[in-house]
Image: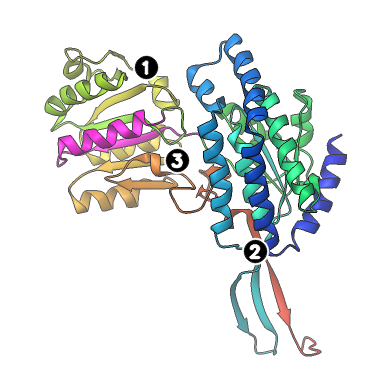
Amino acid sequence: MLNAMGKAARQAAYQLSTLSTAEKNRALLVIADMLEANSQSIIQANELDMSAARDSGMTDALLDRLLLTPARLSAIASDVRDVCRLSDPVGQVIDGSMQDSGLRLERRRVPLGVIGVIYEARPNVTIDVASLCLKTGNAAILRGGKETHHTNQATVKVIQQALEQCGLPKAAVQAIDSPDRALVAEMLRLDKYIDMLIPRGGAALHKLCREQSTIPVITGGIGVCHTFVDESVDFAKALTVIESAKVQRPSACNSLETLLVHDAIASRFLPELSTKMHAAGVTLHASQAAMPHLQNGPAKVVAVEEEDYSDEWLSLDLNVTIVADIDAAIAHIRAYGTEHSDAILTRSISQAERFVNEVDSSAVYVNASTRFTDGGQFGLGAEVAVSTQKLHARGPMGLEALTTYKWIGYGDDLVRP
């Protein structure tokens, strides 16, 4: 089955690679319109997945990721339209030169070919990946988790109908709709047809892909994100940023998971943090040093466990620990972080520069929430993933990250001397 899907995707990719920007944008607009026109059937399918997920005991964080509402689906359709307004990287000349031999060289952006994506309870990924791949002339093979089975079927059906309406091959966007886990292992070895693989899910999925894939894998999306509060901050402003980073959407990979507070202000800052977090319904997981400053506050507080520092909460829970200085904060981030998104809240330019230079994450912020690590917020449109590795792509992956380049040489009946 997968070989047939891969072959069809490869053929579709050849056709997509020759489309003009106008042709690709037209297809995206039709997809957006049809998603909205068929929103009832998609949401009904999602309700089946939500019901099954609740019965299985899925956590609130994953339920939130799985849920599609009319407002969310409308926002996703708007994101597809936003991709139309982005500059098409395909065909861009990156650079060029004239050689002494008379050969004129240029590097030109081209599609990667076929993108494979494996994801869990994230139905929005189906549409995000389809729109970005189509804009860059790539075909896509998707494998969503069993949690999104009905939602993905309904969504891909609409996308394929839109493609056919535009005279494009429906194999440009395909989904593996069988829950058989053996198909994942088979997909990881489909290097004859898939050019790049992107896992979007938990640490176990990323580990599986790294260890078993014969296809280049883009890893990331595991966000143990930190914010360091130094001794110079304005308390009220810092607390506002912290609350937003933790509460705005706790199930997102860029939400705040661990707060590092400078020892010099801990006795004054942490009681105010407790009041702020109590109002937001956040449970604080305190280190031994932080506990005395929090246990008399209104927020629920429990002792942090060592393993908590290395995991995503993806919920209204926040680790809180006290550090002696910026060196200790950076050391903690290096020990427990996932190189996703980390921030410093400070009024010191020198402290900010040290943090930016020494924290080796894909996104580093000064006096801003980690929640900004997002394709839309970065002006990239809907993202296909957030990469925490260092080769090819890093951070939110937009259009350019789904292209490669080819060298083109122009001569006049030129031969090598």
Query: In the image, what residue type sits under mark 2?
Result: Val
Q: Measured from the top left, where is residue 180 in percent x and y?
A: 77, 23
Q: Measured from the top left, where is residue 384 in percent x and y?
A: 58, 44
Closer to the camera, 357 or 373? Answer: 373
- Of tags 2 and 3, which is closer to the observer? 2
Query: In the image, what residue type sits under mark 3?
Result: His
- Of tags 2 and 1, which is closer to the observer? 2
Q: Measured from the top left, where is residue 300 in percent x and y?
A: 27, 13
- Residue designated by label 1: 305
User: Is 229 covered by the magenta stretch?
Assistant: yes
State whether residue 138 appears in this view: yes
Give the mark, 1 or 3, whose residue is nearer the N terminus: 1
Asked which secondary structure carries label 3, the reply is loop
Q: Which residue is drawn at 87% across and 34% down?
A: 1
- Quadrant of the image containing the C terminus: bottom right
How far is the residue under mark 2 from the one under mark 1? 48 Å
How far is the residue under mark 2 from the one under mark 3? 28 Å
Q: Which residue is drawn at 41% across and 30% down?
A: 249
Give the mark, 2 or 3, whose residue is nearer the N terminus: 2
Q: Disc 1, disc 3: CB below 8 Å? A: no
Give the mark, 2 or 1, whose residue is nearer the N terminus: 2
Asked which secondary structure carries label 1, the reply is loop
- Residue designated by label 3: 340
Q: Give the range drawn in magenta.
A: 222-249
How far is the residue under mark 1 from the one under mark 3? 22 Å
- Residue designated by label 2: 90
Closer to the camera, 327 or 1? Answer: 1
